[in-house]
Each structure stands twice: as structure tokens, then as C-alpha cells.
Amino acid sequence: MGFPGNKLKQPLSPGWLDDYTVILRRLAQAEFDDAADWYERRRAGRGAIFTAAIRQIITKIAAAPDAYPEVYGDVREAGVQGFPYAVYYRIEPNQITVLAVFHSSRDPSVWQSGIANRWHYGFYSRRCS
């Protein structure tokens, strides 16, 4: 499961660059992959539905990164439709960095602690589509 490693380009609102990259940090990718695998083990095809929901919210984030609220410093939260997950991301120059793909029942201090310590979430791992 997971995203192929190609660049995501979309027009942004005025004042932004014409193109940019959406990047998942390693732990965000691992969280996403684990969740997709979990759903697939529970019911065939559900992992693909989860993957499509994550792709959809990342596409929405890419199209309008300011549309979602800041919930922890400059980190924004976008809920995943149909699943108890949220995507946490940061808007940075030239890119959007996905910090976590996180289940809503988990303690948010887990991903929040990684914000202060970039090694916890790892360096950027893959570009997504």
C-alpha cells in the first residue's frame, strides 16, 4: 500500500508558488501503511478504500492548504472522510509536509512530541500523489 513517489503539482491560491511538493515523513508513511494493512486484514478491499480516502484528503490539502485549522502551533489537521483518522501537516516554503496519519482515539501527544524532535518523525521520506 502507500503512495507512489511522484511529485504532486496543483495550482495554489494567490501568493503561493505555482507548483510544490507534498511529502510524507517516514513515520507518517508507516502509520498510513499500517492502517491500510489493518483495514485490509479486516475486510478485503477496505484497505484500498482507506488508501483512496487518504489520497483524497491529501489532494484537498494540496488544493487549499489553508482551509484546515491550525491545531498545534503551525500544524494543521484534516479529517479523513469515513475513517477515524486525521492527517496532520505543516505548510512550508515550496512544500506541504505530512507529519502524521493518526487515529483519533490515540493520544495526540504522540505526534505532538515529534514536532519538537524532528528525528522522531524522521527526515522527509517520499513524495506523494
Image: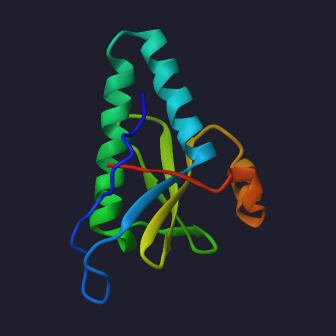
Judged left or right of residue 12, residue 128 is right
Residue visible at 31% across and 27% down?
Answer: 49
- The scheme the figure's colours follow is rainbow
Occupied quadrant, residue 119: bottom right
Q: Position of residue 47 (x, y in %)?
A: 39, 22
Residue visible at 39% across and 40% down?
Answer: 3
Give the quadrant of the N terminus: top left
Which residue is at the front of the view, 94 or 12?
94
Judged left or right of residue 62, residue 124 is right
Which residue is at the front of the view, 30 or 109?
30
Q: Position of residue 126 (x, y in %)?
A: 48, 49
Occupied quadrant, residue 118: bottom right
Residue visible at 58% across and 74% down?
Answer: 74
Which residue is at the front of the view, 102 or 27?
27
The answer to whether 122 is drawn above or below residue 43 in the figure is below
Q: Position of residue 107 (x, y in %)?
A: 71, 44
The answer to whether 8 is drawn above or below residue 104 in the figure is below
The answer to whether 5 is drawn above or below residue 66 in the figure is above
Q: Position of residue 35 (x, y in %)?
A: 52, 28
Residue 52 visible? The answer is yes
Residue 81 visible? The answer is no
Judged left or right of residue 81, residue 95 is right
Occupied quadrant, residue 72: bottom right
Residue visible at 28% across and 72% down?
Answer: 19
